[in-house]
């Protein structure tokens, strides 16, 4: 894969054979981010879990203390009084049954997170094929299936992120923007790691976090010293 000149220069800052402490890694990621936009800082954790087994699924959500730096558009599926509640709490879109054809047939996906009240899950379930692969399906574990739509919306706007295993048992999550201070990124990272370590499946044998990399959207990956993260 051919890389641009900027990437090649940025990559020279990173010693591929080294495992970095979190503070050093964050400083490097900020230094190596040379894109013309405010890149997202992402964490990629390779786990020893086997997501094909229900008891080894890792999934949940956590509110990052400094948010994600991203404006999140929220769609809420609700009815009755919950529609007014969702609108009052600042949801970007609120609706029910009438949104199904718009999403299914017109391909409308101008939202980043979907929240639903439990009584609407029958309706939302029909969108499983569209929302599922995009990671947009509401889930009780992530706090996005709830009667307390105000709390769900407030948490998401405050910087709540969802973490889950992908098909290769890797967790990919944003922890902020390159414009954040090193301290803010470190705080967000620590909050995320605390939640993920707490979510370790009790049935797992062997290493939980096999490797961890922190990177910016367009920058090189910086490998972390996993021993210090889970020790």
Image: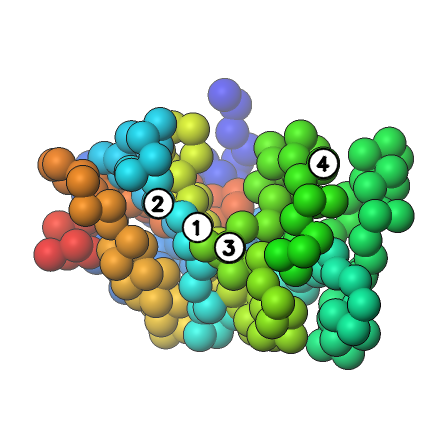
Report crowding for label 1: few under 14, some 14 to 19, many 20 or more residues within 10 A (C-alpha): some
For marks 1 and 2, the one nearer the N-term is 2
Q: Going 35% across and 45% down the picture, which residue do you hit?
A: 58
Marks 4 and 3, how far apart at CA: 17 Å
Q: In the image, which is nearer the foreground, mark 1 or mark 2?
A: 2
Q: Name the residue under label 1.
A: 163
Q: Mark 3 points at which residue?
A: 140
Q: Nearer the viewer, residue 211 or 149?
A: 149
Q: Do the residues labelled 2 and 4 touch (CB within 8 Å)?
A: no
Residue furthest to the bottom? 88
Marks 3 and 2, how far apart at CA: 13 Å
Q: Do the residues labelled 1 and 4 touch (CB within 8 Å)?
A: no
Question: Residue 122 got which mark?
Answer: none
Q: Residue 65: percent from the left, percent from the top?
A: 44, 74
Q: In the image, which is nearer the foreground, mark 1 or mark 3?
A: 3
Vertically, is 82 above or below 201? below
For marks 1 and 3, the one nearer the N-term is 3
Occupied quadrant, residue 73: bottom right
In the image, 63: left or right of 127?
Answer: left
For marks 2 and 4, the one nearer the N-term is 2
For marks 3 and 2, the one nearer the N-term is 2
Q: Residue 122: percent from the left, percent from the top?
A: 69, 44
Q: Going 45% across and 54% down the picture, which residue do you hit?
A: 141
Q: Mark 2 points at which residue?
A: 58
Report crowding for label 4: few under 14, some 14 to 19, many 20 or more residues within 10 A (C-alpha): few
């Amino acid at each position: 894969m051919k890389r641009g000149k900027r990437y090649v220069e940025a990559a020279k800052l990173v010693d591929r054979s080294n495992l970095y402490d979190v503070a050093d890694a964050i400083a490097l990621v900020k230094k190596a981010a040379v894109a013309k936009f405010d890149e997202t800082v992402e964490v990629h954790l390779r786990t020893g879990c086997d997501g094909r087994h229900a008891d080894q699924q890792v999934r949940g959500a956590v509110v990052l203390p400094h948010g994600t730096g991203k404006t999140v558009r929220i769609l809420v599926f609700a009815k009755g009084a919950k529609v007014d509640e969702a609108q009052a709490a600042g949801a970007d879109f609120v609706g029910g049954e009438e949104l199904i054809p718009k999403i299914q047939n017109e391909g409308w996906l101008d939202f980043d997170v979907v929240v639903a009240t439990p009584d609407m899950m029958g309706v939302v379930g029909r969108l499983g094929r569209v929302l599922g692969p995009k990671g947009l399906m509401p889930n009780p574990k992530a706090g996005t299936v709830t009667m307390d739509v105000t709390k769900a919306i407030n948490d998401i706007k405050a910087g709540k992120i969802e973490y889950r295993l992908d098909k290769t048992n890797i967790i990919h999550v944003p922890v902020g923007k390159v414009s954040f201070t090193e301290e803010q990124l470190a705080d967000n990272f620590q909050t995320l790691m605390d939640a993920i370590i707490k979510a370790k499946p009790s049935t797992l044998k062997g290493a939980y976090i096999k490797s961890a990399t922190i990177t910016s959207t367009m920058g090189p990956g910086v490998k972390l010293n996993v021993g210090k993260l889970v020790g």
